[in-house]
Each structure stands twice: as structure tokens, then as C-alpha cells.
Image (cartoon, rainbow, N blue to C red):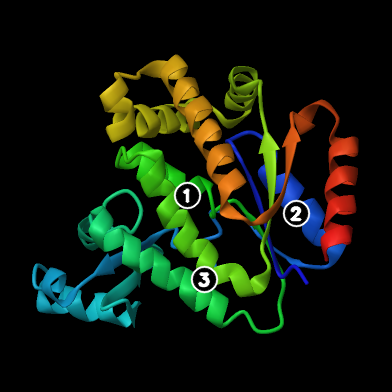
């Protein structure tokens, strides 16, 4: 039985809506990205070691420890529990965006391991996190090549293998048009933030990417790599080409495939 279904694809491809539809149709628990309390991902948390805490005052350390869990050889702190100067200090230890890779990687793998070992009787549908989040970090932020990204994703797949994972990938050959349409709805703040992330990371800087066109170029290469990696993982999956052209048919194909493999 498939106890973990993960919907992947580029931004603005319909992942969240598709994942929610699958969960409702199959009676599974839907988990969106950005929920702040993801069972397999750190979204708005900081990671600090004992050594890191030495940079804080005694009062600050007490507050941090009150809102932290001891994990991965350090402390996972909920950033949403803090404000002001202390928040600004803790933000520099955010798991995504700030930690060096040699620190982030084992922390994230511990989170996946914890999820796989404690899932118990529930079945989940995730919006991304298996491909998108690792690729954003390994490729976009750190500028690693495809082999490094694949090795990391394979480690995650090894941990979740007992859950018989299934990946639904929403392919998109119309990336430019899809993002243009979504940016009109999501606003300039969203667009500027994603452009800065994709063009300002090591991948974007190496290629001299900038602006909207640079962002689209980064997304198109990310999709190429994701599909290439997915094809080698040995994880059950279905890849839909441009499902936005006919969502009814796409959803029918997804549910039909999932009913067969479940």
C-alpha cells in the first residue's frame, strides 16, 4: 500500500491543488508546503549547536531552549516563537537559506528518518519536498551538480522506501507563461523574492542569470534535472505532460494509476 504520495513539479504547476485533490479522493492526510509544522521538513526553524548558543546572552539562551527541541546533536528552534533582536539573531541559523550544507544535510536527513520511523498508521500526500526542496538547496543555493543532488535525494528515498512512496510529477513545457500568469496573482513581492533566490544563489551566479528570464532559465534546467533524477530513482511515479491543458483528464489518469498500484 502506498502510504506516501508526493506531488512534484515547478512553481505554478498546480502541485498544491493536485495534492489536496488526491488526498481527498483517497482519504489520505494532505500536507502542504509552508504549513510551519511539516512532519518531514523544516520550513521556519533554526538549528543551533551548543557552540552557537555561546553567542547569546544567558537570558536569550533560556528563551531559545524553552522553544527548542534537542535533535541532531543540537537544538531545533521554532522561529515563529521569537521577535525583535532575538529573532534576527536566530534567523542566521535558519535550516534553509543560511546553514552551510555540511550542517544542513544531516539535520534534514534526521528529519526524514524521524518521519519514516514514526508514521504509524497514517498515510500522507505531500506537496513537493522530495525533489523541489532538495533541488532548490543543492542546485540553486549551493550550485552542486546533478550527481550530488541525486545522491542526496536517494538517501531520502532509502529512508522512505518502507512507505512505498509514489511520485506524481506535473511537467510543464510552458514555464514562462505559467509563471507570468501566477505572478500577476501572487504579486511583485513573491516574484522578486523567487528571482533573487534563483539568480542570487551559486547556480545563478555561475551562469550570470538575472531578472525574469534568468529565473525561467533556472526553472527549466531544474525541471530537466528533476525528471532525469526521477527516472533513475526506482520510485513508482507518473509524469504528466502539461496537465494544465486538461486537468480533468490529468486527475483521472492520476487516480487510475494510483488505484492500480495501491
Crowdedness of circle 3 by 10 Å Cα count: few (<14), some, many (20+)? some
> Picture coordinates of residue 82 (x, y %)?
32, 65
User: Which of label 1 and label 3 is nearer to you?
Assistant: 3
Q: Quadrant of the C terminus?
A: bottom right
Q: In the picture provided, is 80 more to the left or to the right than 131?
A: left
- Say if 52 sits above or below 177 in the image: below
> Picture coordinates of residue 45 (x, y %)?
37, 63
- What SS does tag 3 mark? helix
Residue at position x 66%, y 28% in the image:
172
- Say if 165 sits above or below 206 in the image: below
Q: Nearer the viewer, residue 234 or 202?
A: 234
Crowdedness of circle 1 by 10 Å Cα count: few (<14), some, many (20+)? some
Residue that mark 3 sits on: 159
Is residue 37 visible in the rendered image? The answer is no
Residue at position x 62%, y 55% in the image:
234
**Of the numbered discs in the image, which one, if any, rests on residue 192?**
none
Residue at position x 32%, y 31% in the image:
203
**Of the numbered discs in the image, which one, if any, rests on residue 20?**
2
**Of the numbered discs in the image, which one, if any, rests on residue 133?**
1
> Picture coordinates of residue 180 (x, y %)?
60, 19
Q: Label 3 near label 1: C-beta < 8 Å? A: no
Residue 130 placement: quadrant: bottom right
Q: In the picture provided, is 220 more to the left or to the right than 78?
A: right
Q: What's the CA distance linking mark 2 and mark 1?
A: 19 Å
Amino acid at each position: 500500500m502506498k502510504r506516501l504520495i508526493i506531488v512534484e513539479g515547478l512553481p505554478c504547476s498546480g502541485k498544491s491543488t493536485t495534492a489536496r485533490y488526491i488526498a481527498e479522493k483517497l482519504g489520505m492526510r494532505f500536507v502542504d508546503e509552508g504549513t510551519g509544522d511539516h512532519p518531514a521538513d523544516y520550513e521556519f526553524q533554526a538549528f543551533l549547536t551548543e557552540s552557537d548558543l555561546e553567542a547569546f546572552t544567558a537570558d536569550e539562551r533560556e528563551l531559545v531552549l524553552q522553544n527548542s527541541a534537542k535533535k541532531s546533536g543540537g537544538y531545533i528552534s521554532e522561529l515563529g516563537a521569537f521577535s525583535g533582536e532575538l529573532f534576527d539573531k536566530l534567523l542566521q541559523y535558519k535550516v534553509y537559506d543560511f546553514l552551510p550544507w555540511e550542517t544542513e544535510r544531516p539535520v534534514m536527513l534526521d528529519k526524514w528518518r524521524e518521519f519514516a520511523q514514526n508514521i504509524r498508521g497514517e498515510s500522507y500526500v505531500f506537496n513537493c519536498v522530495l525533489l523541489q526542496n532538495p533541488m532548490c538547496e543543492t542546485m540553486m543555493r549551493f550550485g552542486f551538480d546533478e550527481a550530488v543532488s541525486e545522491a542526496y535525494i536517494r538517501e531520502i528515498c532509502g529512508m522512505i522506501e518502507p512507505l512505498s512512496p509514489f511520485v506524481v510529477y506535473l511537467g510543464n513545457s510552458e514555464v514562462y507563461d505559467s509563471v507570468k500568469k501566477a505572478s500577476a496573482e501572487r504579486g511583485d513581492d513573491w516574484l522578486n523574492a523567487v528571482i533573487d533566490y534563483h539568480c542570487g544563489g551559486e547556480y545563478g551566479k555561475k551562469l550570470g542569470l538575472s531578472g525574469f528570464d534568468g529565473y525561467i532559465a533556472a526553472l527549466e534546467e531544474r525541471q530537466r534535472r528533476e525528471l532525469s533524477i526521477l527516472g533513475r530513482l526506482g520510485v513508482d511515479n507518473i509524469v504528466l505532460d502539461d496537465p494544465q491543458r486538461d486537468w480533468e483528464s490529468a486527475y483521472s489518469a492520476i487516480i487510475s494509476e494510483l488505484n492500480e498500484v495501491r
